[in-house]
Amino acid sequence: MIQYFKNINHQTVAIEQPENGSWVNILPPLKQEEFSDLAEALDIPLDFLTDSLDIDERTRYEEDDNVKLIVIKTPTENNSFNDSDAYYITIPISIILTHNQIVTVNSFENGAIKKFLHTFQNRHPDNRKMMVLKIFEKIIQTYMENLKEINQRRNQVEQKLYAANRNEELLQLMRIQKSMVYFVTALRSNEMLLMKIERTNFLGLNETEKEFLADLIVDNSQALEMANIYTNILSSTLDAFASIIANNQNQVLKRLAVITIVLTVPVLVASIYGMNVPIPYSNSPFAFYIPVFLSLAISLVIGYFFLKKKLF
C-alpha cells in the first residue's frame, strides 16, 4: 500500500499521486509491481525501495544519482504466535530523499511513522533534511516509550514471581530479555549511523540542523544506556531467581533425605521383629509394644540430632 501526503496550509492532506514536496509512505501489503512503478515514476533505484523488506537489513546510508538512502532500525511489537518469542523486535525502515520528495518504506507498521504522520502538519516539506531528523526523533522516542513499558512489565512479572515460582513468569522474563537484546543491538547500530551522518554531513545540514542532530545522538545514547541498564537488571534478576530455585530444591531434597533416614529405623526394627525365627520377648504380652516404642525412641533420638544440626 502506498500513501501520498502533502502539507497544505499546515494540514496533512492525502493526495492521489506524488507531487513536489510530498511525502510517500509505503506500508504492507507490498507488491513488487508497485515498487517497480514507483521507482520509475520517482527515478529511484529499485533496490532502495526493497532493501528494508529484509528484516535483517543492516543500518547504513548510501547515495546513487543524487538519491539518498538511509536505513535505520525502529522498534515494533512482535505479532508472532509463538509464546517464546520476544514481545518487541526491531525492523529496518528506509528513508529515501529523492529530487523532490521524501519516501519511507516500512516492512511492518510501526509507531514511529504513525507519530510522524500525526505531526506532519507542523513540518515543512521543502525542508526534507529536517523531516528526516524528525523521523529520527520519533524513532528514538518510540524506543524510550517501549523501554519504559518493558521495564514496567518486568516489575509486574517479578512481583508475581516472588509470590509463586511458576514457569509462566520465567517464560515472560525470557521474552522480555529477548526484546532487550533486539533493542540494545539496534540502538547501538543506530548510534553509529547517526554519528557517521554527523561526521560526514551526509544530509548537508546547516548549523541549526547539526545541533539538532547532536541532540538526537545524545537522546539515542540515553536510550541505549537505559536498555543496557534494564538488560543488566533483568540478567541479575534471572540469575537471582535461578539461585533461589536451586536453593529451594536443595532444601527440599535435604528434608526428604532426613525424613527417609528417620523413617528407615522403624522399618528396620519392624523387619527384624517380623522375621519367622525365635526372637526375644516373642511370648511376652508386650511383644507388640516393645518394637513400637523402640522404633519411636530411636526415631526421636535421630530426629533430635538432625534438629540440633539444623538439618531439618
Image (spheres, grey):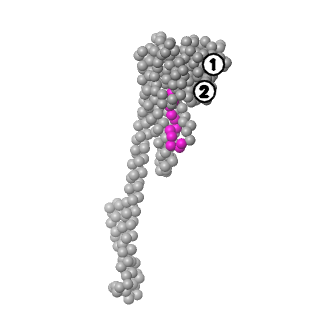
Q: Where's the N terminus, which quadrant?
A: top right
The answer to whether residue 89 is above or below residue 309 is above
Q: Please, what is the three-letter code of the amino acid marked with disc 1? A: Phe
The answer to whether residue 110 is above or below residue 83 is above
Q: Earlier in the sequence, mark 2 or mark 1?
A: 1
* Residue topped by disc 2: 31
* Residue topped by disc 1: 5
Does residue 216 show up magenta in the picture? Answer: no
Q: CA distance from mark 2 to mark 1?
A: 20 Å
What residue lies at 54% left-to-right and 36% top-to-bottom? 78
Categorize mark 2 by other alpha carbons within 10 Å: few (<14), some (14-19), many (20+): few
Give x and y (percent) for residue 311.
35, 61
The answer, for residue 134, to whether it is visible in the render is no
Residue placed most toward the observer, 284 or 45: 45
Task: Describe residue 84's horizontal placement relative to residue 242 as left or right.
Answer: right
**Residues rendered magenta in the picture:** 82-93
Q: Please, what is the three-letter code of the amino acid marked with disc 2? A: Lys
Give x and y (percent) for residue 218.
44, 22
Q: Where's the C terminus, which quadrant?
A: bottom left
Give x and y (percent) for residue 125.
58, 14
Question: Which quadrant of the figure has residue 298?
Answer: bottom left
Give x and y (percent) for residue 61.
46, 20
The answer to whether residue 266 is above or below residue 190 is below
Does residue 86 show up magenta in the picture? Answer: yes
Q: Identify the element where label 1 is drawn.
A: strand
Categorize mark 1 by other alpha carbons within 10 Å: few (<14), some (14-19), many (20+): many
What residue lies at 60% left-to-right and 13% top-to-bottom? 21
